[in-house]
Each structure stands twice: as C-alpha cells, then as structure tokens.
Amino acid sequence: MSDKKLWGGRFTKDTDKQVNDFNSSIAFDARLYKQDIEGSIAHATMLGETKIISKTASDKIVSALKGILRDIEAYKVVFDIDAEDIHMNVEKILIERIGEAGKMLHTGRSRNDQVALDIRMYLKEELATVENMLNSLKFTLVSLAEENVDTIMPGYTHLQKAQPINLAHYFMAYYEMFSRDTERIKECYARTNTMPLGSGALAGTTFPIDRKFVKEQLGFAKLTKNSLDAVSDRDFVLEFAFCNSLIMMHLSRFAEELILWSTNEFGTITIDDAYSTGSSIMPQKKNPDVAELVRGKTGRVYGDLMGLLTIMKGLPLAYNKDMQEDKEAIFDSIDTVKLCLPVFTDMIKTMKINKEKMFVSASGGFTNATDVADYLVKKGIPFRTAHGIVGNMVLYCEQAEIVEGIENLSMKEFKSFSKLIDDDIYDCISMESCVSKRNVFGGPAKKEVLKQIVSAKKRIGG
Ligand code: ARG
C-alpha cells in the first residue's frame, strides 16, 4: 500500500511525481483555509452532538482545528503539495497533531460536499465585499450627479452629437447600471446561501447526521435538497462570474467614454495626475492608464466566465475532477473586480470636469434640431413635416457655414422656413431649455434628475 496519501489504502504504487503536481490544487485553494476549517469545526461539533463520535473526540478536533487556523494565520503552517488540496492538508495536519481523534473528522463527509461548502462560504464573503464596493461607487456617482445638475453636455447616439442633456443624468445612468449589478449580486448571494454538507460523495451518508445543525452553525439560509445536484452544482460560481462580467462591462463602457473625453479633441474632462501615467519617451504625455486597464481587464473577467461555462458543459453527474478548475477562474474574476472597482471609483472622484468646454460642445452639432421640430409641432405642424423643415434648416446652416447652430439664424431666415416661427423660438431652443423641457419621468430635466438623486440617496443610505 502507498502510505503517503490519506486515500492510499487500495493503491500499490506511489503517485507519479508528475501526476502528483498535476493533480494538486493547494497552490490556489489554500485561500479557502478559513472556510475549510470553519466548516470542519461545524461538522465535528455536529458529529459530537449527534453522538456519531464521542464528545471528547469532537472537542479535541474542534480545539485542534482552532489551533491550526491560528497557526495558518500566523504563517506558521507550510502546506504540502503531496497532500493535494486544502481539505487534505488540514486533515493531515489535524491527524499529525491529535492522532486517532483526528481520523474521525471525515466521518459522514466527502471532499465533494466539503469543497462545495467551502466555495459557497468563500463566495458569500466575496459577494458581500463586491456589494460594498458597488455601494461606494454608486455613492460617488450620486455625489457627482448632485454637483452637475446644471452642467450641460452633449448626449450622443452613434457617437454623433444627438441632444443636450445634463451631466447629472449621465452619471445617474451609470448609477442605474451599478444598481442592477447590486441586485444581481444580492440574488446570487441568496442562491449561494444554501448548505450542501451532508450530500457526501454523491449519495448522502448512512450516519444520522444533523444537517440543520450545521446549517445554523455556519449561518446558511437553507439546505440543498438533492445530494447529486449539491455536489455537482457550480451554478452559483457561474452566476458570480456573470455578475462580475456585467460589472466589468459597465465599468469598461464608462472607461471608454472617459478615455475619449480626456483626449485633446474632446477635452471635456481631465483625469487627475494621480490617476494618470506618463510616457517613457514623449514628455508631454499624460495617459489614462487606469481607465484603459479597467477596459482591458474586462476581457479577462469575460474569459473567466467562458472558461467556467466550458468546464461545466459536458460533466456527467455528479462530481468530476474537472470542477477543481473552477477555483482559479472565479478567484481571478473576483480579484480583478475587487481591484478595478475602488481604483475606478477614486479616479472619477478626482477627475476634473471642464464644464465650459462641455457646454460649448453641447451647443455645436445642431443638438437642438429636435427641439426646433418640437417647436413647430406645438405650432400645429405634423412631426414628420416639421422634421423635414428642420432638416432643410440644418442643410442651409451647413451650406451657409453657420456652424454655431440653428439659434444663430435671423428671424427673417427662420420665417423663410416657416411663417409660424416667432421670436419665442430663441428661448425655446437654448441648451438650458432643451434640457429642462425634457421633464418626462426618467428624463434629463434637472427637476426629474433631482428626484432620481433623492431616491438613490435613500436607497444607498446616503
Ligand atoms: N480539490 C478538489 C476540488 O477542488 C476537492 C474535491 C476532490 N474530490 C475528489 N473526489 N477528488 O474540486
């Protein structure tokens, strides 16, 4: 028999060195040590309570596990690659420390339900962290919105100037996206909050365990209901990876705009020096590296999701070792999001908004053309006809090189397009009025945006 492995009883040879390294996951699953030990403490306590093992053995295991946890946190433990993964490492150390009692810990349990438990516990903590980071970002967005209810900017479609809006409305658009991300994270948390221990390798256990006791000890909301599903389910891991992908997609779109706006051509924002970097050759350069890296890292978070989806797609029930590959992907996805959210939040907090330039930019490109058409509609002209008239005005302005905009036409010129146009047109198509008249629920009018800000502040407790 091979005496190196905890599972070595039926083996006649040692594991090939290459296979040993190939199979081992301790290099990346060591980060589950806390959850693994807390899960084992709950399991051992339950084994004692139900008299499956003696109270003395249970107490001995629990106190030794606490000691192992302390020692790991004090960097006193060196994990062993030969012990394969975090579960076997902890069990091995336990047996080394307390002997026979330690050998009782794995009664009525398998690594398959153990790893499912550990990941769920780990992800619950990380979901809460990501939720907090999203809240800080949303809080920042609301503050920026509050400061910019009177900052007029050009709204775009097709990256062509479309209609003026205020910058507050723009920030609140991202607030909405990150609010949906928060909802998704909470929903993912609810599904992750299910306790799988007791499912065994695949078919539960013959011991009279108390799953409810373990669930309560570990603060889970409910129990998994099918042992086969419980050990082969990684939906919650995939969901988290998807939530992260959407968070990154939102950050990336935002980053793309900030990169564009900070160019010399746009110049509507200036990213703070502390959040920019220089060039090794061009002395004048100030590059938006933070925003670019956030955009770039979105690719790897998508990659993590695609990897996870692909790992799971062909797996027969129940556990398969392929599932060990879930960890690096989800850890990387979480680490990346946790890296991006705070730095992005601080970057937008510190960027300078060039309000004057934004206003000038909003005024160009005939952004009030729809408002001229709406003006004509209110004077009794059908919208499609009004659209044609204003189209002709834009063409006239372009040909006459009146680039500043329709509001620069004289009354005589206006009348040549429609007799219905009067002096009130000038007020009606000013940038301020174009924005303030868009006062539908969810629209960019200051009054409406302020309502959204108030309700957002209530929702994030700001
Ligand atoms: N390290 C393994 C994983 O991450 C733990 C479960 C191993 N189970 C097994 N039957 N080999 O998935």
Image: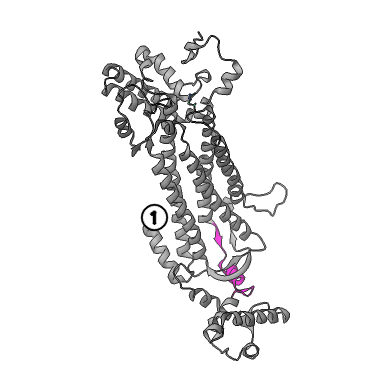
Q: Measuring from the top left, give residue 183's x and y in whole percent.
A: 43, 51
Q: Residues within 10 Å of mark 1 (few under 14, many from 20)?
A: few
Q: Residue at label 1?
A: 460
Q: Measuring from the top left, give residue 62's x and y in whole percent.
A: 33, 22
Residue 7 vs residue 394: left or right? left
How many labels were placed on the picture? Answer: 1
Q: Is residue 276 visible?
A: no
Residue 212 vs residue 390: left or right? left
Which quadrant would residue 44 be assigned to in this image?
top left
Q: Measuring from the top left, give residue 249's x and y in whole percent.
A: 56, 51
Which of 172/323 is in front?
A: 323
- Magenta stretch: give its range: 351-368
Q: State the scheme by which the image is colored.
A: one colour
Rendered view: 348 above or below 237: below
Q: Report if the beta carbon of the residue with label 1 is closer than 8 angstroms to ligand 1.
A: no
Q: Is residue 358 visible?
A: yes
Q: Secondary structure at mark 1?
A: loop
Residue 266 vs residue 215: left or right? right
Which quadrant would residue 115 be assigned to in this image?
top left
Rendered view: 14 above or below 236: above
- Residue at 50% across, 52% down: 345
- Residue at 51% across, 25% down: 26
In magenta segment, residue 387: no
- Residue at 68% across, 80% down: 397
Q: Measuring from the top left, give residue 372's x and y in whole percent.
A: 58, 80
Residue 214 vs residue 264: left or right? left
User: Residue type at mark 1?
Assistant: Ile
Rendered view: 399 above or below 341: below
Q: Name the quarter where the C terminus is drawn.
A: bottom left
